[in-house]
């Protein structure tokens, strides 16, 4: 097993995963009744925000509209990034801020505004509240990189 990464290396690796071309994530939400729902979605990472695009009538869009909370997982089980996020805004594709739409399109390789069904999609902007990242058991200590929406610094966090 490799030595645990430093906070700085783990943060850099995490950002690299979030900025990777065609980055995909598992996005988990819950209904107001607490019914869990999880789907794979392409993500965009811009200015410290997660950008998702999904159908307006999707369970994910409905759940986020009601709760404004999601859990997002990027990477494999041996190099995972777990994010608790809150939804800041939801836009129709036509009304989405151009920089968010452009960032998503470049990173995901798909521009939803060019599809004939663009009217049926929403762009969702999420703010990370907590980010944790680890590879093996020896990185569980120190896995919390962000809490309360702020990067924690180089001190180990055990939450």
Image: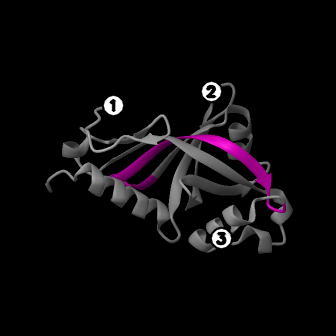
Residue 85 in picture, x, y percent from top left? 55, 41
Q: Residue at x 31, y 42 (%)?
A: 143
Q: Is residue 98 above or below residue 66?
A: below
* Residue of label 3: 105
Q: Is residue 63 above or below residue 9?
A: above
Magenta-colored stretch includes residue 79: yes
Give the mark nearest the N terminus, 2 or 3.
2
- Select label 2 or label 3 by which is in front: 3
Q: Is residue 78 in sight in this rendering?
A: no
Can you give x and y, in whole percent of width and height, for residue 74 in the image? 45, 54
Q: Is residue 78 left or right of residue 53?
A: left
Q: State the residue in front, 10 or 55.
A: 10
Q: Quadrant of the C terminus?
A: top left
**Sequence-earlier tag: 3 or 1:** 3
The mark nearer the N terminus, 1 or 2, is: 2
Q: Mark 1 vs mark 2: give the one in front.
A: 1
Distance between mark 1 and mark 2 Cα atoms: 24 Å
> 64 left or right of 15?
right
Residue to which mark 1 is pinned: 159
- Which residue position holds label 2? 34
Q: Quadrant of the N terminus?
A: bottom left
Judged from the image, the secondary structure of the residue bearing numbered disc 3 is: helix
Does the image show residue 12? yes
Q: Which residues are magenta?
A: 74-94
Mark 1, secondary structure of its residue: loop
Magenta run includes residue 132 = no
Residue 145: give x, y in percent of width and height.
Answer: 36, 44
Q: Which type of secondary structure does the marked residue at label 2 adopt?
A: loop
Residue at the limit of the structure toward the top, as seen here:
33
């Amino acid at each position: 097993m490799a030595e645990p990464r430093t906070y700085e290396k783990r943060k850099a690796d995490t950002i690299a995963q979030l900025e990777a071309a065609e980055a995909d994530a598992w996005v988990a939400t819950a209904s107001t009744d607490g019914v869990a729902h999880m789907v794979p979605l392409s993500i965009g990472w811009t200015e410290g925000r997660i950008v998702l695009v999904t159908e307006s009538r999707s369970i994910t869009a409905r759940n986020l509209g009601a709760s404004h909370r999601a859990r997002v997982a990027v990477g494999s089980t041996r190099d995972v990034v777990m994010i608790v996020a809150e939804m800041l805004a939801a836009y129709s594709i036509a009304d989405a801020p151009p920089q968010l739409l452009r960032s998503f399109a470049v990173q995901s390789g798909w521009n939803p505004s060019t599809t004939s069904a663009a009217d049926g999609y929403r762009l969702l902007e999420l703010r990370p509240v907590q980010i944790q990242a680890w590879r093996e058991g020896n990185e569980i200590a120190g896995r919390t990189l962000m809490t309360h929406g702020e990067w924690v610094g180089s001190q180990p966090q055990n939450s």
